Structure formats: C-alpha cells, structure tokens
Amino acid sequence: MSGTSEPPPPVEVTLDEFLCFPLHAATRAITRVYAVLLEPFGLTYPQYLVVVALDEADSPQSVGALGARLRLDSGTLTPLLKRLEQRGLVTRGRDPEDERRVLVALDGDGCDLARRLAGVPARAGAATGLDWDQVTRLRGDLAALIEHLDAWEDAAGLSPDGPAS
C-alpha cells in the first residue's frame, strides 16, 4: 500500500494474481471459523458484529450509525436487528429527540451474551496462525485498502449501495 510508483501489472492476470480473490477466500474462511465459534451462542457472524458494536458503544446507537459502523445497509441490518430483538438481546425504539431515528441498544441478556462472547476473537485469531504483529500489519494494510477504495467510490460518485442518482 506504499506510494511507490512501480509499473502497473500486466493487463492480463490470472485468478491467482487477482487481489480480490484471496480477499474473498480469506473472508469466507474466517467467517467459517466464526460460524463454528458462534454456533453454541446461536449467533450468525453479522449478528455477532452487531452485539460487539453495541457492547462497545457507550449509548444507544441509531440504526444508521450502526449500519455505517458495520458497513451494512438498512435492508440487511433491519431484519438482523428484528431477530436479535425477538431473542431479547437488543431493544429498539424511537429517538425521543428525533422520531425518525430508531435507536438500538443491548438489553440485559444482550450484555450478558456480550460478556460470554469475550473469548471469541482470541480463538478466531488463533485459528489464523498469525502472530499479533502479523495481525496488526494485516489490519493496517486492509484499513489502508478500504480507505483507498472508499475514496475511489467517492470520486466515482458511487455509494456503497450503487451509483448515485
């Protein structure tokens, strides 16, 4: 991700030379690890991310802010929140200061579940075979990649949900 001006790669590259393919494969692999670790808790990976994000927040979060934090659109997030609410893990309600906004927070059972999930990241990390320094570097590289791709989308007039209207 450095700013060096190396020549571009050849126009024709094989699947093994694509950047997107190992990212896709790694995402699927780590998600499978989390699926195994989260199964005893009855959570999917996206539900887990919601529980973690709400546990980290110091106040109820708007659905919009939560979606932005997790990079999930409302069409994905709303049904997920409904399922967590049905399980008694989160509460949803209108913002008293702005009735258009829906606020979400963990309730008592959700807070208890978040505490019980505390060991999951270390177990998933161990499955990667990477040491802490490698994980730190990889996270930094991926954060830079995301930043560049977000900037590209902005410059192209795109939103995460598709072309701007």
Image (cartoon, helix red, strand yellow):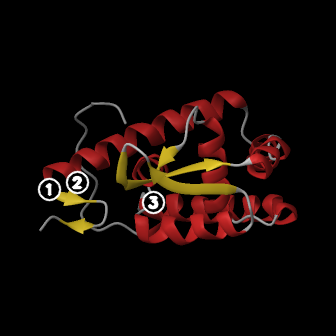
Considering the image in quadrants, where does the C terminus appear?
bottom left
Q: Is residue 160 above or below residue 126?
A: below
Secondary structure, mark 3, is: loop
Corner quadrant of residue 151: top left
Secondary structure, mark 1, is: loop
Query: According to the image, label 1 marks what residue?
Result: 156
| Residue 70 placement (x, y as % from top left) | 49, 51
Per the model, the C-alpha gap separating discs 2 and 3 is: 16 Å
Q: Are marks 2 and 3 in contact (CB under 8 Å)?
A: no
The kind of residue on which mark 1 rests is Ala
| Residue 33 placement (x, y as % from top left) | 75, 60
Q: Is residue 85 left or right of residue 111?
A: left
Q: Earlier in the sequence, mark 3 or mark 1?
A: 3
The kind of residue on which mark 2 rests is Glu
Identity of the residue drawn at 40% across and 53% down: 64
Query: According to the image, label 2 marks what residue?
Result: 153
Which label was assigned to residue 76? none
Identity of the residue drawn at 76% across and 49% down: 124
Secondary structure, mark 2, is: helix
Q: Earlier in the sequence, mark 2 or mark 3?
A: 3
Q: Residues within 10 Å of mark 2 (few under 14, many from 20)?
A: some
Near-viewer residue (158 or 61): 61
| Residue 71 placement (x, y as % from top left) | 44, 54
Q: Are marks 2 and 1 in contact (CB under 8 Å)?
A: yes
Which label was assigned to residue 72? 3
Q: Is residue 45 left or right of residue 99?
A: right
The kind of residue on which mark 3 rests is Leu
Q: Which residue appears farthest toward the top when viewing the image?
A: 133
Q: Residues within 10 Å of mark 1 (few under 14, many from 20)?
A: few
Per the model, the C-alpha gap separating discs 2 and 1 is: 5 Å
